[in-house]
Image (spheres, grey):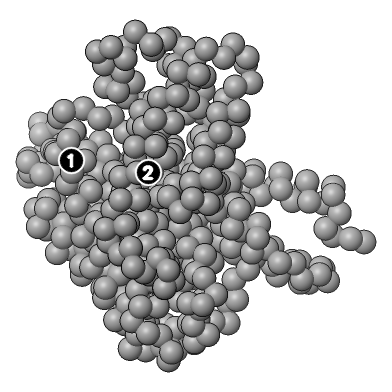
Amino acid sequence: MDILSSYNLIIAASVILICSFSFGEISKKTNIPSVLMLIVLGILLKFGIDAAGGKELNFLPILEVLGIVGLIMIVLEAALELELKREKMIPIAKAFFIALIGLMLSAWIAAMILHYFIEGMTMEKAWLYATPLSILSSAIIIPSVSSLREDKKEFHIYESTFSDIIGIMMFYFLTGQLDAVEHSSGLGGFAGNVVLTIVLSLIASYLIVLIFQNIKSHTKLFLLIAVLLLLYALGKKMHLSSLIIILVFGLLIANMNLFFKGPLKKFLNYKEAKHIYDGLHIITMETAFVVRTFFFVIFGITIVLSSLLNLNVALISVLIIASIYIIRYAILALFIGRDILPQLYIAPRGLITVLLFYAIPENAIVPGFEPGILLFIIIGTSLIMTFAMISDKQRTGAAVRKASKNPIGYERWEAPTIEEMEEVK
C-alpha cells in the first residue's frame, strides 16, 4: 500500500491542521509555544513514515516555498495590526532601535563564536550564518504574547516585525557582499536600494487600494494576495528589499486616515477600503496559520536528531544562546529600565532562521556547520520563553488574587505593591 497516496495525504493534512488548532488552544492555557508541538509532530511523522517503509522525499523545495509565503503572511498580519498614532511614535522608535541593536550585537558575537569553533568558517561567512540565528521569530512571538499587558504585547509585535525585516535585509546585503560584482556598491548602494524600495512600495500600495476599492467582485481578496505575492517575487528578481513592499502596504491600509490626507482624501472610498482591510485581516490570519503549521511540521520531518548529540553542536549552541540573553538584558535595561520581565526571555528563533539558512548561496556553504545548531537554538530559546511566560502568568495571577482579597477577616493581610497593581492593570 502506498502511504503517500492522494487520499492518505488529504487525511494527513487534515489531521495536521486539526492538531495545530488543538496545539494553539493548549498553548493559550500552558504558554508552551505551539511551534514546538508542531516540530515534535513532524519528528513523530518522520518515525511513522520510516516505520511504514515510505520512500525518502526531498522536502526542501516545499519548505522554502512555505517559508516565503509564511513570511509574507506573518509580516502582513503584523503590519495590519500596527497603528501609527502620534502617541505611539516613541514606543515604535524604541522597539526599532532595540531590534536593530540587538540584531547587530547578537550577530557579531555569534559570528565570532562560529568563526572560532568551526573549521573553514571565515569571518565573512560567519556573519552570514550568524544573521539567521540572531533574528527574532515573529511567527512564534506574535501568537504567544496575546495574554501580556497591552504595552508589552505591542512592544513584542513591533520588535519582532522590525527584527524580521532588518534581519532579512541584512542577510541579503551580506550575500551580495560575497559577490564581487555587487561588492563595489557597498552600504551606499544598499541604502539606495532601500529608499527605492520604499518609494516603489508607496506608489504600488496607493495604486492597489485605489484600484481594489472599485472592484465589485466578491473574490477580490485572494486576487489581492496574488498581487502582493507577485510584487514580492518580482522585487526579489530585481534585488529589492521585497519585504518592505508587504510592510508598507499593510501599514497604509491599516492607517488609511493617515496616508489619505488633504487632496488624496477625495480619492478614497473609506467604506470599501475598510471592507478590504477587514477581509484581508481574516484571510491573512487564516493563511498564516495554515502555512506556519505545515512549515514547522515539514521542518520537524527533515530534522536529523543525531546531530543534537554532537558535543561541539551543544557547546556552540549554548554559547550563542547565552550571548543572546546577555546582550538582550543590557539593551532592555538601557532602553526600558527595570520592568523587563518577561520581555527579557521572549527572544525565540524560528521560521525565518530556518528559511534564511536554506537560502545561503552555494559559494558560502561551510561543510563543517552542523544544522543541529539551528534546531538546538530554536528549541532552547523557545523553551526559555515558555518557562518565562508560565512564570509571568503565575506571578500575575498571584498579584490578581492578592489585589482582590478582602482585608476584613484576615489578621495579616498585606496590601499589593504598586508594581503588582500595575501588572493587574
Relative height, residue 106 to residue 98 (above, below)? below
**Residue drawn at the location 33% of the way across and 81% of the way down:** 123
Relative height, residue 195 to residue 372 (above, below)? above
- Are there few (<14), some (14-19), or many (20+) residues within 10 Å of tag 1? some
- Are there few (<14), some (14-19), or many (20+) residues within 10 Å of tag 2? many
Residue 136 visible in the snapshot: no
**Disc number placed over residue 197 in the picture, else none:** 2
Give the amino acid at mark 2.
Thr
Q: Is residue 172 or residue 102 the one in the foreground? A: 172
In the picture, measured across the screen, residue 240 lies left or right of residue 299, that is left
Secondary structure of residue under mark 1:
helix
Residue ranking furthest to the right: 1
Secondary structure of residue under mark 2:
helix
Query: Which quadrant, please, contains the N terminus?
Result: bottom right
Image position, residue 213 (x, y; %)? 49, 15
Image position, residue 196 (x, y; %)? 35, 44
Q: Is residue 387 or residue 70 the one in the foreground? A: 70
Inter-mark Cα distance, 2 to 1: 25 Å
**Disc number placed over residue 91 in the picture, else none:** 1
